[in-house]
Image: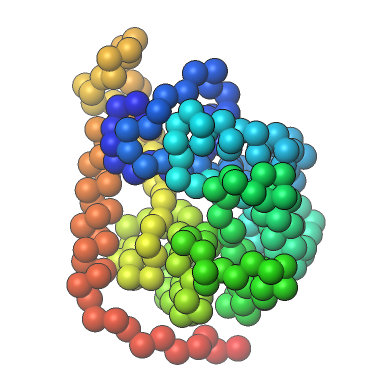
Amino acid sequence: MKYTDVPLFVSNRPLSKLKELYRARGRVSVDSGGFSELDGHGSWDYGPTPRQYAGQVGRYVDEVGIDWAAPQDWMCEPWITAKTGLTVEEHQARTVGNYLDLKAIDDRLPIIPVLQGWTIPDYERCIDLYDRAGIDLRALPLVGIGSVCRRQGTEEAARLVTEIAGHGIRLHGFGFKIDGLRRVARYLPSSDSMAWSAAGRREGQGCDFRFPASRGPHKNEANCLRYALGWRAEVLAAVREGLSQPEQLVFPLAA
């Protein structure tokens, strides 16, 4: 945030530990860290309470100037529901419930709603849950779509994103890598990915890029700004490629 003006998507988990924050030079949004909480603990019991999280987001609004933050949502991948012991329906109810709780704590917070599910009917059921709660997703500037990242390069995911975007909802895609963006860029006003960091961690050694306060060479590229910006250039090229392709007709998946 201090060293670049490109848009950033930052996890609340490390951000909340910082005593000093900086006004962002560019646009910044915040991830709640939900996948890490559920994957690591099978619940949100070890993470911030909704009131604590609302306070953290409020701080980022005041001190960083963030655009928006994700709620404390519940992913619906089969391996995640296996860890929580809950159904997809319960994960969806908790996702919608947390969004409502956070807005009730402070309705000025720029929390966006998130759609969770696994199949197209699941996501449509989640849309209905918001509708019944009085939340018109079509009227909002951005709505997250989760539980897609591990399959985002597949035809199934492309059909899913296309179908949900067809409801007139402006989607942010969580965890969309380059191949996935080539397929669905036209349906996602924004997206994020940590793929660059995972790839950078596998690099044999870090480059010679240094922040002004760096103490020495970095061991790999997992947190290197130069490496991240190079990856971003590849992502933008993939988006341009995807937007240049003719729009594909999408047919419902077989039951």
Q: Is residue 43 above or below residue 160?
A: above
> Residue 89: horizontal and vertical position, in percent?
74, 68
Of 176 and 201, nearer the camera is 176
Q: Position of residue 247 (x, y in %)?
A: 29, 81
Relative to 78, does residue 11 appear above or below in the rendering? Answer: above
- In the rendered image, the residue lying farthest to the front is 108
Residue that appears at 46% across and 54% down: 175
At x 41%, y 41%, the residue is 28
Q: Position of residue 57 (x, y in %)?
A: 58, 37
Specify whether residue 201 is in view: yes
Measured as percent of width and height from the top left, residue 147 is found at 56, 61
> Considering the image in quadrants, where does the N terminus appear?
top left
Please name the colour scheme applied to the rendered image: rainbow
- Considering every residue shown, the one lying at the far top of the view is 215
Q: What residue sits 79% from the left and 56% below the top?
A: 85
The quarter of the displayed image where residue 105 is located = top right
Tell me if 80 is positioned left or right of 174 in this view. Answer: right
Image position of 49 with respect to 35: above or below:
above
Name the one closer to the observer, 90 or 58. Answer: 58
Residue 191, compared with residue 249, is above or below; it is above
